[in-house]
């Protein structure tokens, strides 16, 4: 199957790592369906030659609507990249039910629903790639991120189990766990804190979105066909 025949669904495709992944794969002739949470985001995706879809992973009605739309109009999705995510940091004693629930819902429940939606088409064609973006936080833990770390660790465990279910049908399931990457999600870190974090990274810097995209480009290719059930860390040595 050539790249021109492969349709890729990427959640959270307007910014940061998701934007970089969409642009990288589009440059390799993949057909890109990208999700955004706003009409403006959808317009941005469409302007790049992608198909933009509005999706709120924290809204059951939105998720169910898009799930049905994908089943009807895009049964031939070959590659799913669950990238969209949020952080709502707080220590456990101060964390609200919404701060906990929203993070778990978007990262775990949304991923589950989209996997279930696209897998039938992959099984029918006996080829597919599911890539879930997790985080070094799932392995390291992080103060104030019990919700985020738990969600990402859950995604990794889910991915291992799913890989065993769909492997016999030619579908691989892997996770990519970035460390600190220069995106909107790390832009809030002040310079002093950033300097302290960089001291913990053997390569001495934050990563770039394109360094994640290059790993994704490999994992969606036929060259990665014997890799499944893995979490691949791209973090400059922060976690080994």
Image: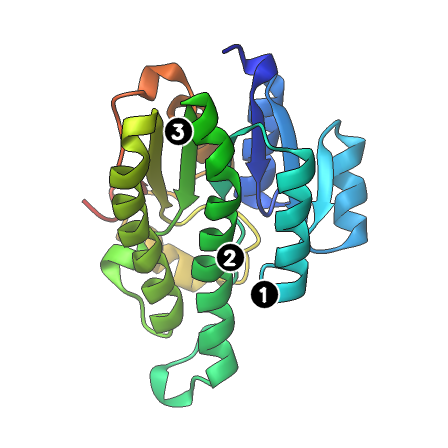
* Label 2 crowd bin: few (<14), some (14–19), many (20+), radius 10 Å: many
Residue at the spot of label 1: 58
Q: Residue at x 47, y 52 (%)?
A: 111
N-terminal of the pair, mark 1 or mark 2, is 1
x, y percent for residue 144: 37, 74
x, y percent for residue 79: 49, 31
Quarter of image, res 228? top left
Quarter of image, res 167? top left
Q: Residue furthest top?
A: 2
Q: Residue at x 42, y 63 (%)?
A: 192
User: Cα distance, mark 1 to mark 3?
Assistant: 28 Å
N-terminal of the pair, mark 3 or mark 2, is 2
Q: Is residue 1 visible?
A: yes
Residues 65 and 82: in front is 65
Marks 1 and 2: CB-CB under 8 Å? yes
Residue at the spot of label 2: 110
Q: Is residue 231 visible?
A: no
Q: Nearer the viewer, mark 1 or mark 3?
A: 1
Residue at the spot of label 3: 215
Q: Residue at x 54, y 51 (%)?
A: 84
x, y percent for residue 82: 49, 45
Q: Is residue 137 above or below residue 104?
A: above
N-terminal of the pair, mark 1 or mark 3, is 1
Residue 99 tag number: none
**Element carrying mark 1:** loop
Quarter of image, res 202? top left
Q: How many marks?
A: 3
**Element carrying mark 3:** helix
Residues 37 and 75: in front is 75
Q: Is residue 5 above or below residue 66?
A: above
């Amino acid at each position: 199957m050539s790249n021109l025949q492969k349709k890729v669904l990427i959640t959270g495709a307007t910014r940061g790592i998701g934007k970089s992944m969409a642009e990288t794969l589009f440059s390799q002739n993949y057909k890109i369906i990208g999700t955004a949470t706003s009409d403006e985001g959808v317009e941005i995706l469409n302007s790049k030659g992608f198909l933009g879809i509005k999706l709120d992973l924290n809204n059951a009605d939105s998720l169910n609507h898009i799930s049905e739309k994908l089943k009807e109009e895009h049964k031939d999705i070959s590659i799913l990249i669950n990238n969209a995510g949020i952080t709502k940091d707080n220590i456990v004693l101060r964390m609200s039910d919404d701060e906990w629930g929203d993070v778990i819902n978007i990262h775990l429940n949304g991923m589950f629903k989209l996997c279930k939606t696209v897998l039938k088409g992959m099984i029918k064609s006996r080829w597919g790639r599911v890539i879930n973006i997790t985080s070094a936080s799932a392995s390291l833990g992080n103060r104030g991120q019990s919700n985020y770390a738990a969600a990402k660790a859950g995604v990794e465990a889910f991915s291992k189990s799913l890989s065993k279910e769909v492997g016999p049908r030619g579908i691989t399931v892997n996770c990519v766990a970035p460390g600190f990457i220069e995106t909107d999600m790390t832009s809030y870190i002040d310079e002093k804190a950033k300097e302290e974090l960089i001291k913990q990274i053997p390569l001495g810097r934050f990563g770039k979105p394109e360094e994640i995209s290059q790993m994704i480009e490999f994992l969606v290719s036929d060259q990665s066909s014997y890799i499944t059930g893995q979490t691949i860390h791209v973090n400059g040595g922060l976690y080994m």
